[in-house]
Image (spheres, grey):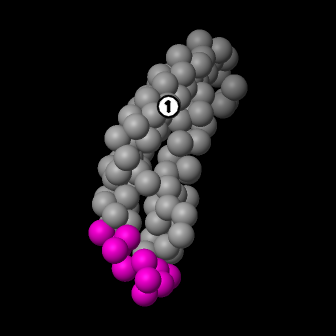
Amino acid sequence: MFILDMTNPLTLILMVAVTIILIFLARELKKSYISAIPLGIFIIIAIIHGAQLINLPEEFNNLSVKLMCCIGIDFILIGITLFGYIWTDDVESKKKSAKDTENSTLQWM
């Protein structure tokens, strides 16, 4: 049975590094959808790990502990990327509101 092993230190370091790079890229470009990409990926991975845990055959019962650890790591990564998304969304909205107030010509009248 194939499992994306998030407990492997190398995999975990690479996932965190790519996530941080994408969050800072989103902040610099002021595009929050860039930081939503890893958030969506981690949510999908958490759903896959949950489905694998629920449908685990009897011969793979020794993998249940590893899957539980993977789900825990998934939720930590979801939390990190959620805060990153909120941060980049705030940066993007401040940029857009500053642009809107600069072009204010009283169009609402």
Of 37 and 9, nearer the camera is 9
Residue under pointer 1: 18
The x, y position of residue 78, in whole percent, is 41, 50
Quadrant where the C terminus is found in the figure:
top right
- Determine the residue located farthest toward the top in the rendered image: 102
Above or below: residue 108 compared with residue 54: above
> Quick one: SS at disc 1?
helix
Callout count: 1
Residue 26 horizontal side relative to residue 46, left or right: right
Q: Is residue 93 visible?
A: no
Give the residue at x 37% y 70%: 63
Of 61 and 45, nearer the camera is 61
The x, y position of residue 56, in whole percent, is 46, 80
Above or below: residue 101 compared with residue 82: above
> Does the stretch in magenta take in 58?
yes
The x, y position of residue 65, in whole percent, is 30, 69
Instruction: Please provide the residue range marked out in magenta.
Output: 55-65
Residue 49 horizontal side relative to residue 66, left or right: right
Give the residue at x 43% y 29%: 17
Give the residue at x 38% y 66%: 67
The quadrant holding residue 62 is bottom left
Q: Is residue 30 visible?
A: yes
Please identify the dominant SS of the magenta region: helix
- Determine the residue located farthest toward the front in the rendered image: 59
Amino acid tagged 1:
Val
The x, y position of residue 5, in whole percent, is 43, 54
> Does the stretch in magenta take in 52?
no
Above or below: residue 69 compared with residue 90: below
Label 1 crowd (10 A; few <14 / some 14-19 / many >=20): few
Give the residue at x 49% y 73%: 52
